[in-house]
Image (cartoon, rainbow, N blue to C red):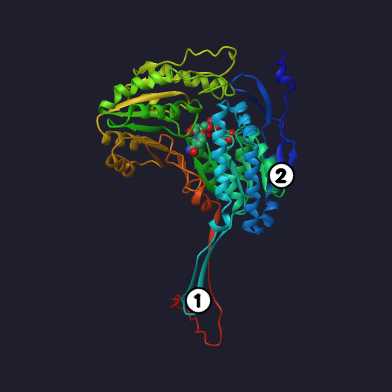
Amino acid sequence: MNKPVEMQNVQTMPLWIGGKHKQATSTRAGEITNPATGRVIGRVPFCNAADIDAAVQSAQRAFPAWRDSPPLRRARVLMRFRELLDQNKDQLAALITAEHGKTLADAGGSVQRGIEVVEFAMGIPHLVKGEHSEEVGTGVDTHSLRQPLGVCAGITPFNFPIMVPLWMFPVALACGNTFVLKPSEKVPSASMRMAELLKQAGLPDGVFNVVHGDKEAVDALLNHPGVKAISFVGSTPIAKYIYETASKSGKRVQALGGAKNHAVVLPDADTEFAADALMGAAYGSAGERCMSISAVVAVGSSADPLVAKLKEKASKLKIGPGDGKDMDMGPLITRAHRDKVAGYVDKGVAEGAKLVLDGRGLKVTEYQDGNFLGASLFDHVKTDMTIYKDEIFGPVLCVLRVDTLDDAIRMINANPYANGTAVFTRSGGAARKFEREIEVGMVGINVPIPVPIAFFSFGGWRNSLFGDQHVHGMEGVRFYTRGKVVTSRWPDANALPTGLNMPTLG
Ligand code: NAD
């Protein structure tokens, strides 16, 4: 069978190892597709263990000199990198839109949120400062310091090609580690561009490397003795696998997983405000965000007016190619994923939920091969339905009705996922109760997508994160460093003998 023209001309992208492009030795490869047009726009190699080893070795060689460079010098590289990201923001957003499909404005916003992590990491001379106590015993002082781990690896998902890698490597590099990034094979170009910008910013060769691939590449990273820490963001089953496998081989791991985020709307909330906020939270990025709201818990009398407003607003969303004018929502990542999400709408109907708005029939003229799906809205969803239990990761919003705030809190706390949640209310008391009693990692009060700013940490609870430390903020600094505590004495002629008993310094 003849291949379509676009496929005949597409290039297989290289890896980024030792500060330059390198061809993979593996012959396995995958296709990169533009989700709006359905066209193949590139090929990405699927690395084997030898390719991964080359990248890890390059990072190992670069580690001693980078570790020994003063934190302020590392910070200055990041300052220049931050400027380059800012200057290239439009190009980076366009790369995201071409491979992921989200709108250009949304892509630009995600680049900005990533830049904020670089800005946080630029403060590294202050962030890694230790503590010092003098005279903890007679003539004895103690100080603590934090030192880098060595080679760290990041494995990232398709939905934030710039922002999620930037949650990881700026902090890791600032702390003095070197890094191997394995971006999602569906959206690899943005990571390659960031590697070039890092080099332009003055990062020494080998400190940052990019490999590509699927399970084979990931497994090689998880099992490589030269890799000291793994940061992962992706779906829950893979996060659990990464956590278990990498822990077994003695690595430090943070593995962020999937989500089912609830927004509670109380009867005293401003319905118009809540419905507006929920549009972006549920349908922005076509619902392909780990912090998307996919379940609205309508308390008491809030339900009827809220569902009416949601329907009115969702039916007006402008859906089309991400680089189209004034688009609200682009296509889904692949045809298979689009069909899977549409299948959930079928299932919701079959299971008895009320389909208030049906996005399945959407056609985007001139983009017949794109992975488009309209916005869907379900009412009267129950907690035993598949559309509630599964992470759909698409433009499908489920409304569940409960009688009280306590019922809402109980429902959310019983869900296996616990990434983000929000409450809409005018009552400070209700908001405070929600904040205290909800068992979820990130909470919004009248803020639908409470993604913490970079100097706080990002991470969920339960099946939304495996490991102890969240990404960026001070937890990121702790994850990418290990502590050392030094107790020192400079004996002179008057020093007391030490003896054989347990030392008590006083
Ligand atoms: P995914 O789990 O399929 O893939 C994530 C990464 O793991 C990719 O780099 C992929 O190549 C690799 N991978 C896939 N299958 C693997 C396997 N069997 N063994 C080893 N590695 C494998 O996730 P995705 O579809 O790219 O991203 C969407 C998911 O990510 C959603 O579940 C979403 O909620 C989640 N996510 C979570 C957060 C968060 O902060 N918690 C942020 C963004 C995305």
**Three-letter amino acid code at disc 1?**
Val
Residue in the foreground of this view, choosing between 310 and 236: 310
Image depth: mark 1 or mark 2 in front: 2
Alpha carbon distance from label 1 to label 2: 46 Å
Do tag 1 and tag 2 residues touch (Cβ < 8 Å)?
no
Figure quadrant of residue 108: top right
Q: In x, y percent, where is residue 88?
A: 65, 36
Quarter of the image for the N terminus: give it: top right
Would you name the residue on which mark 1 appears?
Answer: 140
**Three-letter amino acid code at disc 2?**
Gln
Left or right: residue 141 versus residue 64 is left
83 up-or-down from 500: above or below: above
Figure quadrant of residue 384: top left
Residue in the foreground of this view, choosing between 423 and 480: 423
Left or right: residue 274 versus residue 10 is left
x 75%, y 36%: residue: 23
| Other-residue count near label 1 (Cα within 10 Å), few / some / many at <14 / 14–19 / ≥20 | some
Q: In x, y percent, where is residue 232?
A: 54, 41
Would you name the residue on which mark 2 appears?
Answer: 200
Element type at mark 1: strand
Element type at mark 2: helix
| Other-residue count near label 2 (Cα within 10 Å), few / some / many at <14 / 14–19 / ≥20 | some
Residue in the foreground of this view, choosing between 87 and 420: 87
Q: In x, y percent, where is residue 135?
A: 47, 76
